[in-house]
Image (cartoon, helix red, strand yellow):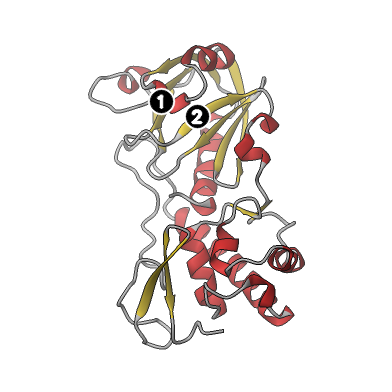
Amino acid sequence: MPEAPEVEAVTRTLRPLVRGIIIQRVHVRHAVAVHPQSAASLKTNTANAHIAGVQRRGKYLLLMLDRGCLAMHFKFDGRILWFDDPKAALARRTHVDIVFETNKGALGFVDQRHLGRAHWLAKLEDSAGLRGLGVDCYSREFTRERLLEMCRARPLPLKLLLMDQARVAGLGNIYAAESLWRARLSPLRRSDSLTDREGRALHKAVVSVLGRALEWCLNPPPDFRNPAWWFADLDGMLRVYGREGQPCARCRASICRIKQGGRSTYFCANCQTS
């Protein structure tokens, strides 16, 4: 699933492309992409709207309109495409769930598994998902003091706490695992047992991992005009995620994989013992 670095890279790359353009018509080709809203509602509320800006909150991409906004969540396989010629977006050979035809081209929302969603919102608070987000992982409010406060308020295993969007918005399975490895902390460690020193180390690790990930995702930036584009290949920057059985980059012990909260957790049982 795209996490905050991937969505932030999309936000920064898309912003100069679509800011100021007008959505003239909306074609909903797969209604599941707007569920539980109706296709008619999406069309009515976005037709002839100006795109004033592009923002991100957690893992959500937000197209701010002159009336309300378009909120997109990519889930596991969603992405967006740009077509200079709107006819190409509507061609049958191209899988596009929603086509936003504009005065400059067409923006397509694409998810072949039909798990991602695009919704029109009169205000951001109308979305339960957005309303329930905690502090954004890239915001200035994500301080070490705030992180320690979260850790002690309602104890959880550290990995599950970092992935809880109601606490830290935008951080997911990949970067939570990478941050814990960098901080030398076990994903099974109870969050309320962290010392101040360990809390500082974890906060520093999260900030460092997210900073490196964003740089990775922006070099090169997403290529929306390429129908085959996908989010950055992270293999070169990952130290534990997806590396079960491979040697730890720090101590050379084998990386382990366990299940936590229904998701795979990767860590080094030798140097992530605290």
Q: Quadrant of residue 55?
A: top right
Q: Is residue 214 left or right of residue 109?
A: right
Locate residue 137, reporting x and y percent: 63, 56
**Which amino acid is tagged 1?**
Val
Secondary structure found at label 1: helix
Q: Measuring 44% from the left and 36% from the top, which residue is drawn there? A: 116
- In this rendering, is residue 192 above or below 134? below
Which circle's residue, 2 or 1, is located before the other in the chain? 1
Decide which of 50, 235 is in the foreground and name it.
235
Report the quarter where the C terminus lies: bottom right
Residue 237 visible at all: no
Tag 1 residue: 32
Q: Quadrant of residue 62?
A: top right
Tag 2 residue: 118
Locate residue 127, reporting x and y percent: 63, 32
How busy is the neighbourhood of tag 1: few (under 14 within 10 Å), some, or many (20 plus)?
some
Locate residue 182, reporting x and y percent: 53, 76
**Which amino acid is tagged 2?**
Ala
Q: Quadrant of residue 63?
A: top right
Decide which of 98, 266 is in the foreground and name it.
266
Secondary structure found at label 2: strand
Locate residue 16, reporting x and y percent: 55, 35
Q: Is residue 239 left or right of residue 90?
A: right
